[in-house]
Image: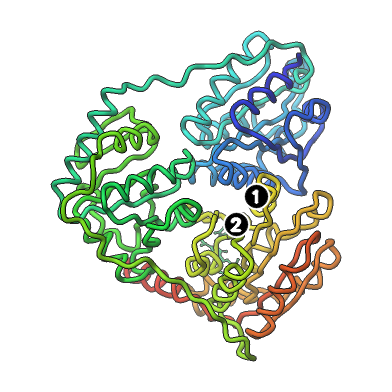
Amino acid sequence: MTLTESLLDALKRAGAREIFGIPGDFALPLFREIERCRTLDLYTLSHEPAVGFAADAAARFRCAPSVAAVTYGAGAFNVVNAIAGAYAERSPVVVISGAPARAERERGLLLHHQARTLDSQFRVFQEITCDQAVLDDPATAPERIARVLRSCVERSLPVYIEVPRDMPAVPCGPVPVLAPSKVDAEAVAACAADVLETLARAKAPVLLACVEVRRYGLEEKVGRLARRLGIPLVTTFMGRGLFSQTDSALLGTYLGVAGKAELTELVEGSDALLMLGVIVSDTNFGISAQSVDIRHAVHAFDRQVRIAHRHYPQVPLGDLVDALLDQAKGPLKGRIPNAAPATYPAGLVADGTPIVPQDIARAVNDLMQAKGRMPIASDVGDCLFTAMDIDPTDLTGPGYYAGMGFGVPAGLGIAAATGRRPLILVGDGAFQMTGWELGNCKRYGWDPIVVVFNNASWEMLRAFEPDAKFNDLDDWPFAKLAENLGGTGRRVRTRAELQAALAAAHAERGRFQLIEAMLPRGAMSDTLARFVAGVKRLRK
Ligand code: S1T
Ligand code: MG
């Protein structure tokens, strides 16, 4: 057994199924072994940021680790931003990087791709991964791999594994199966009892769920908990897409001032907000910072629980939810959800009116109601706010880290990881960054439907800086480019054209479909308009 075989077997056991990567000379022996073993599927892309985004989305969709494999320096530094985003949004991406061999390290020459010291790269990744290992010795490698992968799964965060180029094919033992980190069942039970007492004392408890619920595969259980306790279930902005497969009791998405008033009042008026797996970020809460009082909340996140000023340090979310389900006997008295489930626009009037962002949501809802739901990958930009008007369906988007360029590669990651056909929503600015990756669809048989919100503008920035010229983008003919990349492109300006293009795109399988929705500058979704107004009010 080679070191790479041990590593790949362990990755597979940890739930990984695919590797996205770009090789380099320091990583060639690693890639050679990956190709030889065929333990995990290998997809090469064009630029490392996309490798990181695709692995991130694959991990989010499968609720399990996925892998980004890169070469030393030029490759690894190129993936840093994507991994930072995965860290911020709790996605278990395993970064595997090639590296110089021991003999090269000891020659005293500066090596190509070296930034400062030979270990600069390791130190950079220490900052954005939760555990790291250098596999420079077959004797210690198995136990290091086991530890790092356990951290990845238990914390649902990226990890970093460095494989010097003389190591991939060396003989190596199998990776041991480690017991899960110790959890004190009594502490978990006490914590759950405290949570339930806190909720029972409250007048208006609400369950607010965010990405960790998805990361740990808890949607069904959390939905059951909300029903059993008889309390309203809402997701955060980042948690949009949760429960779309499992639960009809979901009321909608809390968006502060950017959202529907009824839901905002429900969440902000709660005197016991049960926040499960919630990232307490500005995009989730910032536009209503004063309104949600964290001190009256129960906050379970990163294997810890805080209840007002009480702290339970070692309570994984899954254990907490199990204990809550165990102890919760029935509905809390007198807690009747007082908000109706959110409704979403549908029924596009297919006429000659120029398209605005909400028309896209309406047209997509019509399509999905007729033809079935699709998973969505959204970039940051007005497309992500417009997605809040799309019927709940599996969705991933960088709602907190907000790194542009995520959408297209994330869609490819979904296609690779799930075999499903994704819908990709992306702005023209973000498409300029990573849209090119669509050229890889042909090789792998992926056929996403891509809607480019083309306003020839960095429109979100214009909203904050209306007089600046630097937010103007040129009009790139994306639909025409699609043809040369192996896809089908359609540029549309009116509602009728949009509806027809979506229907045609849906009907054509086997090639990616690019719909370029031409939007007038200044036309924003209502949600983005409210978001911008809210942020501006706060900054005053
Ligand atoms: N660079 C990267 C990698 N990510 C970012 N979020 C930004 C810069 C800043 C930024 C925004 S929004 C935005 C930029 C440049 C404009 C997006 O343009 P486009 O994709 O065309 O979408 P739309 O026109 O709908 O705004 C954020 C939020 O800070
Ligand atoms: Mg734009």
Would you place residue 455 above or below residue 280 in this image? below
Q: Is residue 385 left or right of residue 407?
A: left
Image coordinates of residue 42 in percent, x first then y, are 76, 38
Q: Residue at x 72, y 36 (%)?
A: 70
Residue linked to disc 2: 375
Q: Position of residue 80 (x, y in %)?
A: 61, 42
Q: Residue at x 25, y 39 (%)?
A: 328
Numbered disc 2: secondary structure:
loop
Outermost residue toward the bottom in this view:
352
From what the image shows, is residue 181 above or below residue 288? Answer: above
Asked if the beta carbon under badge 2 is closer than 8 A to the nearest atom of ligand 1, the reply is no
Which quadrant of the structure image shows residue 24? top right
132 relative to 232, above or below: above
Would you say the residues marked 1 and 2 are in contact, meaning their CB atoms lie under 8 Å apart?
Answer: yes
Q: Is residue 470 visible?
A: no
| Residue closer to the observer: 77 or 173 | 173
Q: Which mark is residue 414?
A: 1
Q: Horizontal placement of 500 versus 220: left or right?
A: right
In which quadrant is the C terminus drawn?
A: bottom left
SS for dot 1: helix
Q: In the image, is the residue at mark 1 within 8 Å of ligand 1 by its beta carbon?
A: no
Work out whether mark 1 precedes mark 2 in sequence or the reverse, and give the earlier one: 2
